[in-house]
Image (cartoon, rainbow, N blue to C red):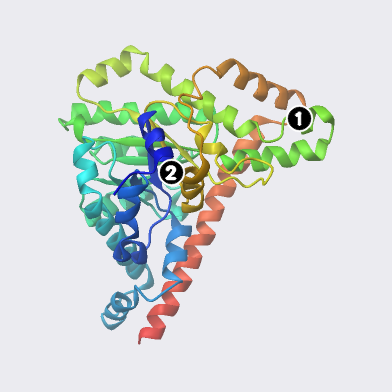
Amino acid sequence: MTQNTNLADLAQAGVSTWLDDLSRERIRSGSLHNLIATHSVVGVTTNPTIFANALSHGDQYAEQVAQLAEAGASIDTAVFELTTGDVAAACEIFTPVYQSSDGADGRVSIEVEPGLARDTEGTIAAAKKLWAKVSRPNAMIKVPATVEGLPAITAITAAGISVNVTLIFSLDRYREVINAYFLGLEKAKEAGVDLSTIHSVASFFVSRVDTEVDARLTAIGTPEALALTGKTAVANARLAYQVFEQSLDTERWRSLAASGANLQRPLWASTGVKDPALPDTTYVVELVAPHVVNTMPEKTLRAVADHGAVRGDTITSTYEESEHILNAVADLGISYDDVTSKLESEGVDKFIVSWNDLLTSVRSALEGAK
């Protein structure tokens, strides 16, 4: 099969395309294989919302649910078995990509229970349990970048587990995430862990920033405010890439790299465009630079394949302009810290709601199978 030209161009520019979706139907139907072969998809991310949707549609889980019901499995056990089963199966599919990319891609992420987002020790224990259960070197465990999540990121990395740090919205929190990863690598090195086996991505959320800031700009309603709509999210992400570059230009990183450490690559998440006034490929083509991952819902992936105009690096020459945009938003009285703090809290809450929906779906399936 031939790779789509636009997505091949994206890969050539240094961006790894991951799919933000997974289901047993996608695994068994060959859909995932097809996207790897034709759309340059080299990884998958999941979250509670994705699993809730997958388990509430179709009958691909019926046989396993019946077995779990017969065994008297609890709802929590059933969710654990169902979701880790899908992730392990997807890891198998991506093994050739994992091997050919020296472990950078071919990754499949699974998230710790979102109710643990404020529980450091609970997050560490859950991450280790998920890692052991999936038991594939190309899995990644997703941990939210809450204050309580930071020491968990360090501990999990130190244990030799690859981590996808999720729900990052602010530049300061991103700096703390990088520090947590570096500290984890340093502890792993002290413990004799092979640093080359540890990979990580830092998932910086994009579209939700525009949704929140644009609502506030629209409420202000002046020409100056309205002229800034649709610009904050891209500017914020571009400055995050600058933070990434700065972190590599340090003696600390050079020492880790000399010991075999891998980059913690920036990953653009929440890349589906919510505002119909923006082109539907905005959060892909405007965020292109080397060593980047972009995880896309299928709708965005198809849009890029159809009409995404990839024009090379669209980040590294924009830092001054991006700072100007964030400063202009702040000058209008919109607090960056308030926006990002609200988005983090809402992000955790939304995943908890989805997790509860997932539990409800599984409960109903178990009861129906009895």
Image coords of residue 285 (percent x, y): 51, 34
Q: Residue at x 77, y 27 (%)?
A: 332
Q: Nearer the viewer, residue 251 or 289?
A: 289
Left/right of residue 206 with respect to residue 223 in the rendered view = left
Is residue 239 visible to the viewer in this orientation of the structure?
yes
What amino acid type should be assigned to the residue bearing mark 1? Answer: Ala
Left/right of residue 353 with respect to residue 194 in the rendered view = right
Q: Quadrant of the C terminus?
A: bottom left
Is residue 124 visible to the viewer in this orientation of the structure?
no
**Residue located beneath label 2 in the image:** 295
Quick one: label 1 or label 2, which is nearer the N terminus?
1
76 vs 286: above or below: below
Left/right of residue 221 with respect to residue 156 in the rendered view = right
95 vs 333: above or below: below
> What crowding class fits label 2: few (fewer than 14 Cα within 10 Å), some (14-19), or many (20 or more)?
many
Total tally of numbered discs in the picture: 2
Q: Nearer the viewer, residue 125 or 54?
A: 54
Q: Nearer the viewer, residue 188 or 354?
A: 354
Q: Residue furthest right?
A: 222
Tell me the number on the disc at residue 227.
1
